[in-house]
Amino acid sequence: MKKICICTTVSLTLKTFVLPTAEYLYRKCGYDITLICNTDKEFEKSLPEYIHFIPVKMARGVDFSGFKSVFDFIKIFRREKFDAVQYSTPNASCYASIAARLCRVPIRLYCQWGIRYIGLSGITRKIFKFIEKMICRNSTDIRAVSPQNMAFAVSEGLYKSEKATVVGKGGTIGVDTQIYDIERKQEWRKEIREKYGLSDSDFVFGFSGRISADKGCGELFAAFRELTQNGLKAKLFIVGPADDDCGIDKELTLWAKTSENVVFAGMADVNQMCRYYCAMDVLVHPTYREGFGMVIQEAGALGVPVITTKIPGASEVMEDGISSVHIAPKSTEELAKAMREVRENPEKVKELGIRAYQRTKELYDRTVMLENQRKDYENLIGN
């Protein structure tokens, strides 16, 4: 029986992006699978008995305690003798890749679900780029989250193209369309709109994610303010937590919080997000950097079209002008223009939504993505 270890820094990443894959690989291939992250007793208790769990303390950010984390990984890898070690997220990837290389684990798989130093500058960018390059050097195989992200990494000298590939069309584990059930869209739309005082006739632009500058929320607030001040009839529905220091102009944030046309729902339970998307006519996702845009896939599963940015990851999920609308990042002017165009063209919104749903079902359905991963693992380590 082949032994696989999958490592991330925190349990939430394992639960959201890894556990369905681990369960599928066990059922289909019979692999012996171990998960590693920071200590989380509740997560450990929730795991099926056939999934092993080993906690390793990993501090967030750059920290000298990382040396101990590496030693802990080394002890585990020497004892368990895994056939393959997979890692993602910055700290877990750094520590596990060093330990796996020192222990000569045959397959060291780096799932590059994002490139941390994008958006950073100065010495901080140099430090994180060095760490990223080291992780890639320590790995025998790399799975980039999208073709454009892979092309960027190759152009940056992080690795050579023959070392990496993209599974399927990109992404991680896709969307569970049994949960994101489009048959319940009207029911959920009514429920959430009534809960937050949105009428059935309101045209609702939605946002899902962390409220911060690098998610494009500054441009979103500015564009929506400009549109409503010029007579556009619409609501803006914000779902997600706010950073303490979000980097958005304080006057602009205050306007959004006091505007009768902006509704802040706060952070929604992850199991309820399918309902929140249904309250939106169009999801606006003006991010500066992205892995592969999970929110775009989730919205697509419910036939909700997206306005997003022309950056690696976000622009690759859907097709510009066919199943989504793409704009330049950091451009309030382009965002406002795109929002006005979809608001004034309901037929276009309908067509974009239908095609977004079709593309999601074809490429990003959970069953499709898990089968892609199974085939990839069997190519790597055999049955």
Image (cartoon, grey):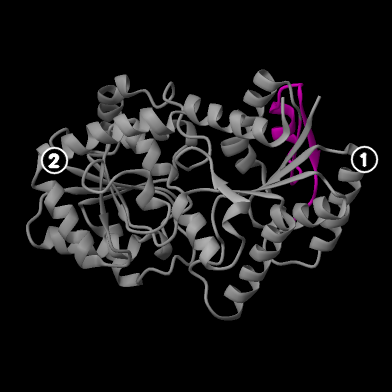
- Up-down relation of residue 131 to residue 13 (above or below): below
Is residue 46 on the magenta stretch? yes
At 13% from the left edge and 40% from the top edge, which residue is drawn? 348
- Up-down relation of residue 108 to residue 362 (above or below): below
Q: Residues within 10 Å of mark 2 (few under 14, many from 20)?
A: some
- Extreme-bottom residue of the structure: 122
Q: Secondary structure at mark 2?
A: helix
Image location (x, y in percent) of residue 133: 66, 65
- Does 70 sit left or right of 262 as displayed? right
Range of residues picked out in magenta: 33-58
- Up-down relation of residue 314 to residue 336 (above or below): above
- Does 57 sit left or right of 221 as displayed? right
Image location (x, y in percent) of residue 347: 10, 37
Badge 2 is on which residue?
Answer: 348
Image location (x, y in percent) of residue 295: 40, 43
| Kind of residue at badge 2 | Lys
At 11% from the left edge and 39% from the top edge, which residue is drawn? 346
Q: Are marks 1 and 2 in contact (CB under 8 Å)?
A: no
Q: Secondary structure at mark 1?
A: helix
Viewer-closest of 282 and 25: 25
Q: Residues within 10 Å of mark 1 (few under 14, many from 20)?
A: few
